[in-house]
Image (cartoon, rainbow, N blue to C red):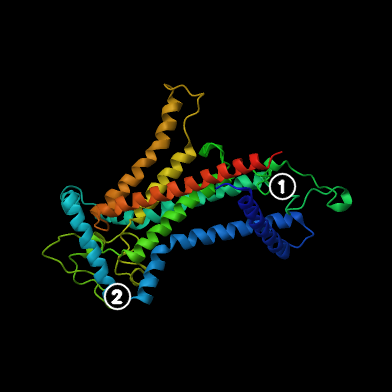
């Protein structure tokens, strides 16, 4: 499995990509200013990361465009209704179909629908974007303190002043994110998140979020699901004038809380929402995926308490509270999406399964990669 030829192939591919990156950077910044090349390299990284995050964040809109372009809406609606009825049947069989009683109980005892509708409409994107920006800025802040501004190419250090800038001062390989030691792994050999650099931590967390969002995207494409709020609705139409609801008024009594009470940000009747939103992007729940991902990222970044802190000290318990209080966020989010009739319980469970698969896949990839580097380093050593 971990043979030397495979390592050589990876090295050749890695070399090709490094050379391509160097040609692009030098082509933009010129070969006379290493400092400018370093700035361009970081800017290219920022542009590619922002493009990836933006495209991933728009998977709901992308699924709506694909369905509207490639599929007759009537067939799309019938598939979504069939999948919704399948979920309801599954939940009734397993005793999970309590969305209607829960919504009626909340409506009778608490209300406050504009708050919960605004939470559904705004907290989901805002909190996720803030977390993504935080870990992205954290990565670049680390890179700016570690980057070797004198060394931006993959060449070796100049042997004499004539071979390079007179003020060339090389950094140790461990001090530059561009030049890791030969055969070094991208992750710690023990797989500990705390041992990773901020750049590696960013890639680890970002990979989990991106993979889970795109898995949900394929769920939106192949398993369109009509949300509970649309099951009894007869008079809600999309931008093309097609009826979106199922009109099953005798079987279901869900309240479309945003349709009846509105939110402070947008309503379903807004033309932009009708045009861009996929009304059947319910399974799995991206609200649940993103909220649980934010909790995982926060817990990972805060890290466990330092061994130097006494178990009974105030700082120990404050750190623990700060680390684990974020767990409330995905719990409140799941409660919100259920009582507003935008998702079934199964949607939330499906979201958690997708996130768990994504986390496991990314962790397994980095673990195998670490072992691969370690194994081949021993094989190649004299």
**Is 199 on the left or on the right of 122, as rendered?**
right
Residue at position x 62%, y 59% from top? 44
How many numbered discs sit on the rendered protein?
2
Q: Nearer the viewer, residue 177 or 339?
A: 177
User: Tag 1, which secondary structure?
Assistant: loop
- In this rendering, is residue 30 above or below 294? below
Residue placed furthest toward the left: 250
Q: Residue 148: percent from the left, percent from the top? A: 72, 47
| Distance Cα–Cα, label 1 vs label 2 | 55 Å
Quarter of the C terminus within the rendering: top right
* Residue 103 in view, yes or no: no
Which of the 4 image quadrants contains residue 256?
A: bottom left
- Residue placed most toward the observer, 155 or 368: 368
Specify whether residue 327 is in view. yes
Which is more toward the observer, 135 or 12?
A: 12
Residue 70 appears left or right of 92: right
Q: Which mark is residue 73?
A: 2
Residue 158, given in percent of the width and then of the height, sits at 83, 49
Label 1 or label 2, whichever lies nearer to me, is 2
74 left or right, relative to 295: left
Give the structural element (helix, strand or loop) at label 2: helix
Vertical position of residue 32 compared to residue 304: above or below: below
Q: Mark 1 or mark 2: which comes first in sequence?
A: 2
Q: Residue 290 carries which label?
A: none
Q: Name the residue under label 1.
A: 148
Residue at image coords 46%, 50%: 208
Near mark 1 (Cα within 10 A), the count class, few <14, some 14-19 or many ≥20, is: many
Graded by Cα atoms within 10 Å as few (under 14), some (14 to 19) or many (20 or more), the crowding at tag 2 reads some
Q: Where is residue 377 in the image (x, y as percent from the top left)?
A: 65, 41
On the image, the x and y values in percent for residue 235 come to 20, 72
**Residue at 29% in and 72% down:** 76
């Amino acid at each position: 499995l971990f043979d030397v030829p495979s390592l050589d192939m990876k090295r050749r591919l890695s070399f090709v990509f490094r050379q391509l990156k160097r040609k692009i950077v030098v082509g933009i910044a010129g070969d006379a200013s290493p400092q400018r090349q370093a700035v361009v390299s970081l800017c290219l990284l920022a542009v590619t990361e922002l493009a990836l995050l933006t495209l991933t964040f728009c998977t709901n809109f992308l699924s709506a465009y694909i369905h509207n372009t490639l599929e007759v809406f009537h067939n799309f609606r019938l598939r979504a209704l069939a999948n919704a009825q399948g979920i309801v049947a599954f939940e009734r069989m397993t005793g999970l179909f309590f969305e209607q009683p829960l919504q009626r109980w909340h409506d009778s005892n608490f209300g406050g629908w504009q708050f919960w509708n605004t939470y559904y409409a705004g907290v989901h994107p805002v909190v996720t974007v803030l977390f993504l920006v935080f870990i992205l800025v954290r990565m670049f802040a680390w890179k700016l303190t570690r980057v070797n501004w004198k060394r931006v190419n993959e060449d070796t250090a100049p042997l004499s002043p004539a071979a390079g800038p007179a003020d060339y001062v090389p950094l140790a390989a461990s001090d530059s994110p561009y030049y890791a030691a030969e055969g070094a792994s991208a992750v710690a050999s023990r797989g500990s998140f705390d041992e990773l650099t901020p750049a590696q931590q960013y890639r680890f967390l970002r990979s989990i979020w991106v993979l889970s969002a795109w898995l949900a995207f394929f769920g939106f494409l192949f398993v369109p699901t009509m949300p509970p709020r649309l099951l009894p609705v007869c008079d809600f139409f999309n931008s093309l004038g097609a009826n979106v609801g199922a009109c099953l008024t005798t079987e279901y009594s869900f309240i479309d809380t945003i349709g009846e009470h509105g939110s402070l940000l947008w309503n379903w009747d807004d033309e932009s929402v009708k045009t861009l939103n996929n009304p059947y992007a319910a399974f799995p729940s991206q609200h649940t995926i993103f909220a649980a991902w934010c909790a995982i990222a926060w817990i990972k970044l805060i890290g466990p308490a330092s061994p130097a802190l006494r178990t009974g000290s105030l700082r120990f318990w404050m750190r623990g509270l700060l680390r684990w209080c974020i767990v409330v966020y995905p719990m409140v989010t799941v409660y919100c999406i259920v009582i507003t009739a935008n998702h079934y319980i199964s949607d939330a469970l499906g979201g958690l399964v997708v996130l768990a698969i994504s986390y496991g896949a990314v962790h397994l990839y980095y673990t195998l990669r670490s072992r691969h580097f370690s194994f081949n380093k021993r094989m190649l050593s004299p």
